[in-house]
Amino acid sequence: MSSKLLIKENHSLLTYNTFNLDTTARRFIELTNSEEIECFIQSEFANNRILILGGGSNLLLLNDFDGIVVHLSNKGIHVISESGDDVIIECSAGEICDDVVSFCVENKFYGIENLALIPGTIGAAPIQNIGAYGVEIKDILQSVEGFDLITREKRILTVSECELDYRSSIFKTNLKGRFLITKVKLRLSRKKKFHLNYRALNEKFGRRSVDIIRIEDVSSYIKKIRTEKLPDYKVLGNAGSFFKNPEVSPEELSELKNQHHDIVSFATSAGTYKIAAGWLIEECGFKGKRIGNVSCYEKQALVIVNHGGATGKEIKEYSERIQGAVKNKFGIILMPEVNII
Ligand code: FAD
Ligand code: EPU
């Protein structure tokens, strides 16, 4: 069976990770369709140390990978059912997430438009429950299909079984590293409904009647905000927010406010508060501060950038300096959002 698979040896990962880190994979395999995926799952290669790779936009590779990198690039987006206002689409994991958003925007399937321009594949979207501008994939995910790499069984997990939370899921906890997502189903709506609570969106669209707001205007505006605020990884390597925004209790927030009156925080639906990690990092003097080839982006301190030629270890060391400074000044421990391999 495995003879059908094309395994590359000592394959460069430079163009497969958005930090633009020059590392290699001991072995590399590209899975482009269901047949190749099934073949891989049944093969002896599935016994190796495996790194599943989508767009490489949430990875920090510290070393060459001494196992097998499995790159998912299976394609396909299909409407599979409609009922009332609901539309269910099925996407192959290797589809580019932003192409899925564009497909929905073109077809006026509402619900995903705020996730425009997030890099990476749709298969990786449930891993950290991607989110932006008031929407998370959790809000529209119906189910996930894939293989348990240990039992080699095909499984379908409903959205509740995926245990999606802020930048977290079962794929980062109990099933960490052992579940290959091959397809996702999303539930969109034909009924016009927007999520405009994020301040910039509210300022732009909040006073307009929903009837005259168009889905393509919302997604275009999101793209504009993102392009202005976030670096282009083709120019400055990065993986988006390096850390999660820390969550604190109301009591902890008021204690912090006694010391730091202008601390930036947002209430969550769970009654806690998220502190803007970008603000904490900026207050510690890291915004735009360059050490070697690494810095925090000058327009968004939560994004660590590679100016070219940095190693994964240098980026990690820089991130640890940030963690130390934030801990000293605010008593807060920043947790990485990026997957450090
Ligand atoms: P990869 O980086 O390839 O992998 C990420 C993790 O998922 C790894 O652990 C990998 O093993 C695993 N994985 C990937 N594919 C699969 C699969 N098919 N099955 C099982 N495991 C898999 N994220 C947000 O949430 N919101 C944002 O606004 C946002 N903005 C960003 C902006 C920039 C400029 C960049 C560079 C990144 C941003 N990100 C954001 C982070 C990133 O885009 C997301 O985490 C995205 O989902 C990663 O997808 P990927 O295909 O690149 O995953
Ligand atoms: N801020 C600063 N200085 C900075 C950056 C931010 O003071 O350098 C403060 C500002 O007050 C700003 C606030 O932080 O208003 C929030 O900033 P922003 O709206 O840019 O959002 P964020 O909390 O930094 C989160 C996500 C992003 C997502 C945006 C938009 C996390 C870890 N990050 O960033 O996701 O795109 O909100 O919804 O939750 C990612 O996960 O990779 C990512 C980019």
Image (cartoon, grey):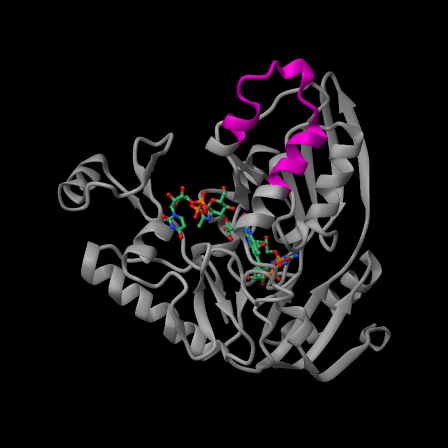
Tell me where residue 330 sits by quadrant.
bottom left
Tell me where residue 70 sits by quadrant.
bottom right
Residue 38 in the image: state x and y as whole percent: 78, 61
- Count of numbered marks: 0
Please tell me whether the stretch drawn in magenta is mainly helix, strand or loop: helix
Quarter holding ligand 1: bottom right
In reply to whether residue 167 is colored magenta, the answer given is no
Q: Residue furthest bottom?
A: 10
Residue 62 in the image: state x and y as whole percent: 49, 77
Can residue 17 be seen from the camera position used here? yes
Give the residue at x 23% y 60%. Answer: 327
Q: Which residues are magenta?
A: 201-223
Can residue 154 be seen from the camera position used here? no
Quadrant holding the N terminus: bottom right
For residue 315, side relative to residue 75 (left or right): left
Q: Residue furthest right?
A: 4
Residue 245 in the image: state x and y as whole percent: 37, 49
For residue 142, side relative to residue 230 (left or right): right
Give the residue at x 44% y 79%. Answer: 313
